[in-house]
Amino acid sequence: MSDSLVSSAPVIKKQSISKVLDASADIPLRSDGTIDILEILKTAVRDFDQGIIALGSSRSYKSSNHLYVNSEYYIKVPRESTYDAEMYQVLVNWLRKIYGYEITGQWHLEQVCDDGNYHHLYCDLTIKKPNNPHLKALLELLATASIPKLEGHFEQVFKYEEQLHPREIWIVHFSHKDYVVTNLYWPSEKLQEKGLNVVHFWHNRDFKNVRMSARFQDITDQYYEIIDEIIL
C-alpha cells in the first residue's frame, strides 16, 4: 500500500444550498473532472438542519452505551435515521433537483447468504450521474458506532458493492464519541485496497461544532488522510 498523505486543512466557509430555487452550489470536481465525493459530503453536512440534529439527542435517540460522550457513558445520541434523513434531503435538493443526479435511499437488495436463505439488505444511499450506467458512489451511514459495529459495516458494505458495482464506496460515520476524529479507527489494509473509503464526523450536541477526519483513495489510487478538519 502506498504511504498516506496527511492534510490539516483550513476552515472552509459554509456554503449553503438550502434555498435551491435561489442559488445553487457548484458540484465539486477533482482534477480528472470526476465529482469529488468527500467534498460533496462536507458541503452537505454544512447544510444539515442544526435544530433537527440537536433534537435527535432527545427525540430520535439511542444510548452511547460504553462509548464516552463528554466523558460519560450511556448518553443519549442521535440515531442513524436522523443523519440519513438529513443527508438524503440535502443531496436530493442539491444534486437531484438542480443537476439531475439520481439519489436512492434504502436501496432494497436480496442475497443468498451462507445459510442458503435469501436475506434482505438495504443500502443507505447511492449517487448516480445522469446518463452514466454506473453508480458514482455508495454511502453507508453509521451513528456513534463502536469498533465492532464499524468493523461489521466495513464488511457489510461489500455485499452491496457486489450487486451495485459503484465507482466509490464510503463509510460515513457521524459520532458524539469523544476524540473520534483524533483517536482514529480505520479499516484493514485489505479492505482499503478493495476501495473502502471512510470519513468520521464528530459534532457537539447542537451541531454548531463539527470536525472531520477521513482516509480515502485519490485519483491516483494513493491513500490520503485528512485529520481533524474543522467543518463548522
Image (cartoon, helix red, strand yellow):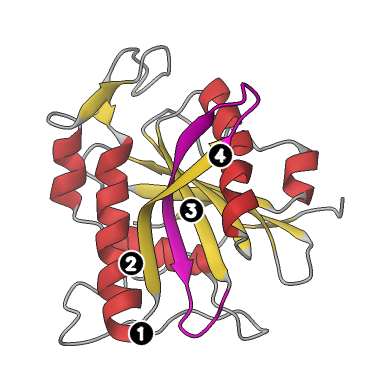
Task: Locate residue 226, reporting x and y percent.
Answer: 61, 55
Question: Nearest the camera: 15 or 228?
Answer: 15
Q: Amino acid at mark 2?
A: Leu
Is residue 53 found left or right of 219 in the rendered image? Answer: left
- Asked if the residue at tag 1 contacts the one at tag 2, i.e. Cβ–Cβ closer than 8 Å, the answer is no
Task: Locate residue 122, reporting x and y percent.
Answer: 42, 43
Q: Amino acid at mark 4?
A: Gln
What mark, if any, has residue 99 been given in the picture? 1
Q: Amino acid at mark 1?
A: Tyr
Question: Nearest the camera: 170 or 75?
Answer: 170
Quadrant of residue 33 within the rendered picture: bottom right
Magenta-colored span: 112-133
Q: Is residue 11 visible?
A: no
Query: Is disc 3 placed on a helix, strand or loop?
Result: strand
Q: Is residue 184 magenta?
A: no
Q: Nearer the viewer, mark 3 or mark 4?
A: 4
The answer for how far apart the CA atoms under marks 3 and 1 are is 19 Å
- Crowd around label 2: few <14 · some 14–19 · many ≥20 (10 Å): many
- First along the sequence among labels 2 and 4: 2
Q: Is residue 121 magenta?
A: yes
What mark, if any, has residue 139 been given in the picture? 3
- Asked if the residue at tag 4 contacts the one at tag 1, i.e. Cβ–Cβ closer than 8 Å, the answer is no
The answer for how far apart the CA atoms under marks 3 and 2 are is 12 Å
The answer for how far apart the CA atoms under marks 1 and 4 are is 32 Å
Q: Which residue is mark 4?
A: 111
Q: Which residue is mark 2?
A: 91
